[in-house]
Structures are given as C-alpha cells and as structure tokens.
Amino acid sequence: MYKEITINENYRDDRALCDFVEALPDRFAGGTLIFEKRNTIRRFTVDSASVPEVIVKRFHRLKGIKRLIYTFFRTTKASRAYHNGLELLARGIDTPEPLAFIEIKSGRLVRDCYFISRPTDFKAIRGPLNDATEFDRPLARAFAAFAARLHEAGVLHHDLNSTNTIYRAEPDGSYSFSVIDTNRMDFTDGRPPLDACIANIVRFTRRLDLFEYVARSYAEVCGLDPDAFAADALTAKHRFDNARRRRKRLLHPTRKY
C-alpha cells in the first residue's frame, strides 16, 4: 500500500502542513467530526502559521469494479475536487482554498482518497431559503445573481444544491457566496447554452415558489424575459423532479415520495 500526495504549490514549503498531509491517513480518526455518511468530513488543527486549521473530506472507500474505474479510466473525486477548486478560484468564484489531496493505493488500485482544504465560516443557504416558512427574498435574489455569475464564468456545478451553496451576510447588507463539494463540475469557454444553465439550477430547491422567484430574478440579471424564462425553467424543474421521484421509487420502493 502506498500514498500519492499532491500539495498546492503555494504551500509546498510549509513543512508543518506537508507533515500533516503525509501522516493524515493514520491520524484521520483524531479530528473533530463534522459530517459522516458515505463520506466523512473532519476538522483538524495544524501546527502551521499560514494554515492553522484544515477541513479533510475522506471519500467513501472504493470497492470492486470502481477501483479499476477510478484507477485507469476516471480521476478520483478527491483529485477533481482539488483541481476544480483551483479552477474556480482562477475564474473568480469563491470556494475554500484547496490545499492537497491524497490517493491511497493497494495492489496498484485506488482504495481511499482524501481532499484537504481551508475551512470557511460561510453557511448553507438551505435554512433561510428552503426551510423557512417565508423564504428570504433578498437572499434569493442574491443567489440568482450568483448563479448567473457562475454561468457567466463558464462554470456548471452539477450539484448546485442548497447545502453546497454557502453564503455570508456582509456588513453593508450584501451577500457573498461560495461553493463546496466541487468534484462534479464542468467548465466552458464563455457562458454555457441557456438550456444547460436551466438544467443546472433545477436542483437547488424543491419549493416551486422559491424556484420560480429565483428563475425570474436570474432572468432579470441576465437581461432575459422573466415570463418566458420562468416558464421554461418550471417545465425543466417538473421534468427533473419527476425523474428524481421515479429513480427513488426504483431504489426504495417501500418509501413514500
């Protein structure tokens, strides 16, 4: 078994960070647990002046045919999260700075992988938008403008949901946004086609009142006809939600959706 480690070139002279990354697989259980399902996320303190804390995401262990796929045919989720994060920053889109990623191999095949980034104090938009009885309209408009800015920068985040879009309220009343869970993304030269942009925003909420409001706000930001755009977006939204329900019924036939 051996490790393949990639460290952000800005931190390759940071001995404390490099030592931490080198030892991480053996000490992963020692961090502060933040999230645990298929993937596990922990926070660690690092004896480094430039990077005092880091967030580490350990992806679900690869088994069987997936080990072959992610060794020879696809880059790992950790690698994509790292490189996509750097590309986002290069395009002016905020995300917690990627610091490193690790791939653990046994028998020449990838088994485990880790993604290391800086922490963030941003919060998920889910609470004030999806969960609130009356959603926060200024935040919803700001999110729509952020989605438009993502697309203008040629970014399609394929899991642009209300957990992976995070925000911070600024003292002047404006909002700053950032994205996480960056392993599923595409980048284009210039703005993607409009149908791709619509398909990209249908997953951030199941609330149709919120979705229509965001769709209209998005159209206004982009100089499009709000009525026509909202109609197209709602059609795509219904199609997406129906397909998702069908998939879940096939996977979990005893549950109610």
Image (cartoon, helix red, strand yellow):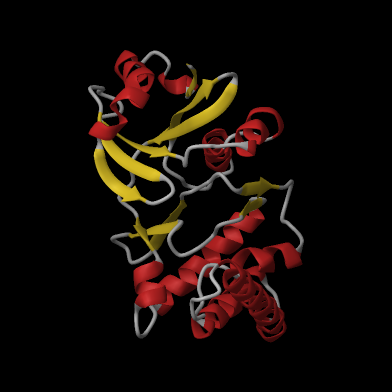
Vertically, is 212 above or below 18? below
Q: What's the residue at 72%, 80% (across, down)?
A: 232
Name the side, left or right, on which 48 lies relative to 235.
Answer: left
Q: What's the residue at 56%, 27% (across, down)?
A: 110
Return the x and y of residue 85 as percentages of the image width and height.
52, 40
Query: In front: 139, or 106?
Result: 106
Query: In front: 229, or 234?
Result: 234
Return the x and y of residue 205 as percentages of the image width and height.
50, 73
Q: What's the residue at 52%, 68% (across, down)?
A: 204
Vertically, is 236 above or below 16? below
Residue 46 image-quadrant placement: top left
Count of picture labels? 0
Name the side, left or right, on which 128 lies relative to 256.
Answer: left
Name the side, left or right, on which 154 lies relative to 162.
Answer: right
Vertically, is 7 above or below 256? above
Q: What's the residue at 28%, 60% (across, down)?
A: 171
Residue 199 image-quadrant placement: bottom right
- Residue found at the very far front of the displayed protein: 254
Return the x and y of residue 37 as percentages of the image width and height.
39, 51
Return the x and y of residue 249 as percentages of the image width and height.
58, 74
Residue 72 image-quadrant placement: top right
